[in-house]
Amino acid sequence: MRLQRALARAGVASRRAAEELIEAGKVRVDGKVAALGSKVDPDRQRITVSGKPVKSVERRWLAFHKPLGVVTTASDEEGRRTVFDFVPDARGLTYVGRLDVMTTGLLLLTTDGDAVHRLTHPRYHVPRRYTALVHGRPTAEVAAAARQRVMVEGRPVEPAEVRVRPGKEGRSIVDLTIQEGRNRVVRRWCEALGLKVDRLARLSYGPVRLGDLPAGRYRPLTPAEERALYRAIGLERDRD
């Protein structure tokens, strides 16, 4: 496979960032400075980046149900539990689209750095579906406001789909599908509508759904889900 793809699959960097490392002369294969576009066999050849060996990592995809209060990071200065604390063997895994500490729901974990880049890049329009329990305005007002253009930090948020329905005790439930991953964009969209978010959960990312996966548990993606993910971002699952 091409060297930049091997680096991305090993979790070193996205393919684009890997290309920059190669062009900067920081990547060597069997002791020789590598050229962009060269092909390698990660299982047989020694690859280093800035002198550090790159270990071949088996491609893995996991669906994880992130609980409330868990942070999406490798470590936390405040000592809070991280998403990787729930996976016994998290070597090489990274997350796809951060969820803030107060948001629950589906978080994809993978060793394929190139796919992470595409899944989170706005160019590929990968849909994410959320449900939010909110209060602050009557449900009819929320529904009307949600049909209007909402700006967050000077840029419009353009949902692919919005559904507003009544909840209990004067609250409303907002089902929202967006195709962008700006930091805390769903919460900020709700706040821009004059709403306070009581609960927020991500229900799906692209073709992968949370389903009935319990909080704090994870499962491997099915082969069909993996194929659908790669199709969504224009990559063949086993492409070199």
Image (cartoon, rainbow, N blue to C red):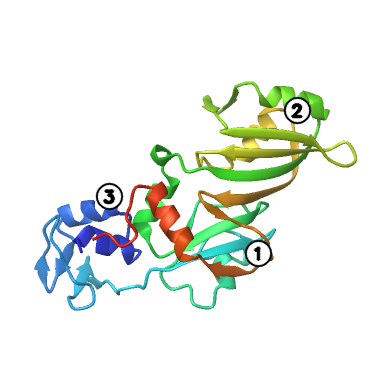
Residue 144 x %, y %: 73, 22
Residue 45 x %, y %: 17, 75
Label placed on residue 16: 3
Question: Secondary structure under badge 2?
Answer: helix
Image position of 129 (left or right of 180): right
- Sequence order check, earlier mark of 1 and 2: 2
Q: Where 91 sits versus 35, above or below?
A: below
Residue depicted at x 25% and y 56%: 18
Question: Secondary structure under badge 1?
Answer: loop
Task: Answer whether labels 1 and 2 touch (C-beta < 8 Å).
Answer: no
Image position of 155 (left or right of 148): left
Q: Which residue is mark 2?
A: 142
**Observer able to see residue 4:** yes
Identify which amino acid the numbered label 3 is placed on: Arg
At label 2, counting other C-alpha atoms closer than 10 Å, the crowd grade (few under 14, some 14-19, many 20 or more) is many
Question: Which quarter of the figure has residue 22?
Answer: bottom left
Q: Which residue is mark 1?
A: 213
Residue 131 x %, y %: 69, 44
